[in-house]
Image: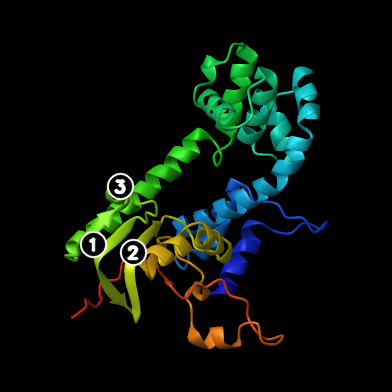
Amino acid sequence: MKQALYAELRDALCPALPSGERRMVGMAELSEVARSTQPAVPYDTLLSIYNQLHQAQVQALDGAMKAGARSWLREYEGGASMAAIALREGFSPCNLARVLLKLLLELPEGKQGAKDVTALLRRPSLLPCRRLADGVAACVAADWQNSPRAEVIKRTVGLEYEYVLAERLRNAGLAFSTEDSLRDEGKAVTPDVKLLVPIALDGHVVHWIDSKAMFGSEEVHAKYTAEQYQRYVNRYGDGLVIYWFDFVDQLNWAPAAAEHSGEGPEAEATVAHRGVYCSRDFPQTFVLPT
């Protein structure tokens, strides 16, 4: 996808307000954007972009939400519902419920407290108070992007595309180790697939493959390069990342762009990594070493 098209979609899904802030469009507006862009932009791609923009906005608001937690708690204790407070302030209902549950139940900070809250979001009926249980359940129902249900959907889609990748590799007759088998071997660095024999794609040597059931924006690619891809390159050599829901074209490293990067006002900043080749699918044609 061209960067200009991605910028148009980003502005359509998260338009600017007169104040300079941005707001996410609602479901009805999202449907309108989908109708106006299809078939050029598949709905799965559009939804992935929307989810990423939404998560960025949620993270930007989380600081304000946590800073005002005591105020929101007093409002809840005064009779307001968690979901109503969250929707009025633009917060994620489930994230607000997490913060208020920690305060109401005096749960510890850290991993154990987070696990306890997640368990209660999954089963609000376990809460000791009927009003609190109903309030948390309402937050879960109102939050289609940060609820336990949404996390299950994301995880399921990710596993589905990992299965698709494995089938494509088997059909191509390629031998490989999976992430689980690498862990069983005691490996600390585990991409989704480690090829037992490297292949060449469009002039790039591929030793490993990572499957991402998402759209690859520059922000997403930079994040995963820092957290994952660079470690794979250091350990195994160059590799391939499949962004199943498309990606912005400049994620692939180009020598011509690298030569002038950082030189003068016309130079384009890039997050492309020399050792990470990006694709929208597992290519049907590749070259085996001779």
- The amino acid type of the residue labelled 3 equals Asp
Which circle's residue, 2 or 1, is located before the other in the chain? 1
The reply, left or right, for residue 28 in relation to residue 185 is right
Task: State which quadrant residue 19 falls in.
Answer: bottom right
Tag 3 residue: 180
In space, the residues marked 1 and 3 are separated at their CA atoms by 16 Å
x then y, percent, for residue 121: 54, 27
SS for dot 3: helix
- The amino acid type of the residue labelled 2 equals Trp
Tag 1 residue: 169
Of all residues shown, which one is farthest toward the front? 186
SS for dot 1: helix
SS for dot 2: strand
Which circle's residue, 1 or 3, is located before the other in the chain? 1
Give whichever of 169, 175 is nearer the camera. 175
Which circle's residue, 2 or 3, is located before the other in the chain? 3
